[in-house]
Amino acid sequence: MNITVDAIDMAAEIIKFGLSSRKGQPSRRLLPLMAAYLANTDGTRTAAKTMAQRFGLSITSVTEDGVVLSKDPEHDDSIFMSKRDDIVKDPGPEARLIRGICNAAILACAYQRQQALYSESVQTITSDEVYELLVEAAAKMNLEQIDVPTSLRGLTEAAKIVERIKADSFSEKAGNPRKQTLRGQINTALKYFTDHGLMLKDSEDAGGTYKTLPELRVRLQTQGAQDIADAVLSAIKASSSDEAMKEAMNG
Amino acid sequence: MQNKQTIFDFGESSALSGQGTEEEVAIARDEFDRLEATALRNRAQTVATLSTIASIVAQTSTPPFSFIDPHTTGLMAIGHAIDSLRLLDIETSDMTVKDLEARVANDLKLQFAALATVGVITELPETEDIEAWGKNVVDKLLCRKEHGSQTDRMFDTESGQFYEFQHALLEEYARGGAIYVRPTAACLTLYLGTLTQGIGDIQTALAAVIQRQIARGEYHAALQTAHEHQRITRQHGEKIRTLKRRIHSNAGRYSWNDTVLPEILIAQRDVEDAITADTTLEGLLDASMDNLPKDKRPLAQRVLMVIRSCRNAYRELQTLAMELPRLYSSCIASQGFTSSHIQLPSMHDDVFVPLFNKITDPVALLVACDVTNGSFAVPQPPVLRDIVAETELLLKPASAAEARDLSPDNDELLDEEVLALSIFDEMTIAKAKSTISSLADAGPTQLSAVIKELEPEDFTEECIAAAIMITGAWAHSRRHDGMYAVSRTYGRFSCKACTGDDYLIERKGSEDEYNR
């Protein structure tokens, strides 16, 4: 196929759209770009995909709503890559654990039903709702483990963390939840979503009301949801083999 | 497909009785049963969707809100949402949730005024309360989680099985980082009353009605019917665009022969019928306009305008429908097999619950959490924090040839002042230096204070020059201007053009060993 200079120009523009921060109305310019990409006019799609791949990116979707780029799994050293530290700023595994649990709860609230991931409708979630989901889940575990409520031994790791930080504490000046509390951590996690064009903060009601934007759905639909579910599955496997080994040693 | 459809198209099927063999009658019977089952399913779904409106006024509501007529309120709210759709760009509306809430609050005020007039209530409720109720009504219509489930279990007589039916009257959608509200396809079907007949048939019937009304001179009625016709045009557009969206999102899931092609053919045929009907109406109106009495003309003009806008909308839809086959093939090519047939996991049942309840190994949990966090990582372009490079870019957006002239000819390490001279004129540097020394001579000062002194008077270049000189002095462990010691602080300075670490500037005298 002969790729024209125009096509390369458009391919570069598509990647530029994907990398720029997505705020405000999608540009009208996107429509001709989308058409050229879908129809692969003069090799626009071929050029865009090749260029993105060289940067360590892959083009997830090109629609009227915008361009979604994601990490190319086979390319680890790209300068465009987000580092793990970009998402969780605090050092140490503790912060990563808390953020992971908060993110899982946020997603569970936003896409409660499986069909919600397929539907283009905007999903609404509140900070309170996420907090309650986590605290109730931990309380339920607690009830099932009546023998050792004080030391929290026997609870799962996630429940232990929630039990430890669930107590509310608010800053004296602005009345915001303190950062190290569960509410504070949920808000920090939600802030990442809003800062990166994945969600929109709608109001301050119910601890903060948020709405999902198309990019989040696209990310989950194309790869994210499956990756997360697979990771959870293999973690459960690791846990059960670990348990079995402990039991064997005790027995 | 075409054959089966004509059997029930009684308008042109006068031949049916003449040529009907027993076999054909049997086929027709099956087809009839199927249509009956479909009609029943549509009606059941309509009732389910409608039930939301009845729940607008909860049984626990207190007076005066318990006196509200929920049905009119709900239908008016939906009417606002439908009317906000753009005719030529049917899928998008400009109405935000807040706009809709305000309109519903207005509608409620009308009802309360009427209630007060007949003496059912003694005084009007507070505006705040009415607004809260307006919000409540919209929330119900959007079927937000906290206002009850959107999903009902329903029974299908054709397959003899239960199925899950998700419904809502309004839905929110995002466009360019803002959230708008629009009616769902089910809502349009419900509100516009096309329960079992095809949209194309209804439009043709409406056109016939308008024609009759015009012939009788009932222009008010004709205008009303024309508006109905216009609303159904919106619904028609929504139907075609839904097809387009489905192809866009996952073409592979829909088979060409069973789903896509028949739908495209029906859409194209319906649109052609509607255009023909509208063109006929337009001709009729145009021809009769001159013979009309003067008082009827403005009304007839309005009917004509509405019909014309519908016809224009249909022209657009026609183009859209004609492009669908090409879109389908290009989507199949670009989407490949990657996204089709993959069952997405449930974020609640497959992710959250097992993550919370089943993982006991901390190391395994950390791995799972890292994947969860990492799947949102948005690729970020690298950010350059090179103050000199940024300054050059800011001050010299010159051609490449000019930029080369400014760059040093050899690789010798540059003194920051030599470089500065190539960027700034002497006046700029003198002004920056004098500001630094005048502040530092009075006592220890900071770079940010110097910037603050310069910036309000639009000495932006001077700010940059000062920042470069001070940063350079620190980087080379040398005194600025021979007598000012520079040490870095944890603070930051910023001006219009640049930002960076803040420095403490102290006068130390000229006897220092570093002095040149």
Image: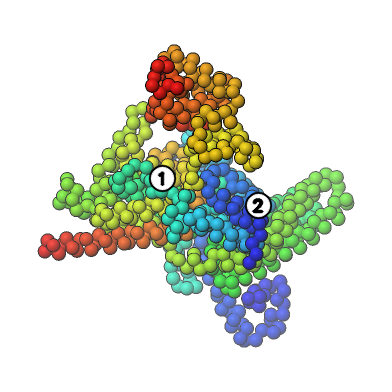
Q: Callout 2: helix, strand or loop?
A: loop
Residue sticking out furthest to the top:
B442
Look at mark 2 in the image and give the residue it sits on.
B89
| Marked residue chain, label 2 | B
Q: Residue at x 46, y 42 (%)?
A: A195
> Closer to the camera, B151 or A76?
A76
From this view, report whether residue B470 is shown above or below residue B351: above
> Closer to the camera, B120 or A121?
A121
Q: Residues within 10 Å of mark 2 (few under 14, many from 20)?
A: some
Which amino acid, mark 2?
Asp
Residue B407 rendering spot, x and y as whole percentages: 58, 37
- Alpha carbon separation for disc pair 1 and 2: 40 Å
Residue B343 rendering spot, x and y as whole percentages: 43, 65
From this view, report whether residue B92 is shown above or below residue B205: above
Q: Is residue A5 left or right of residue A122?
A: right
Q: Residues within 10 Å of mark 1 (few under 14, many from 20)?
A: some
> Closer to the camera, B400 or B515?
B515
Q: Callout 1: helix, strand or loop?
A: helix
Q: Is residue B15 left or right of residue B329?
A: right
Look at mark 1 in the image and give the residue it sits on.
A86
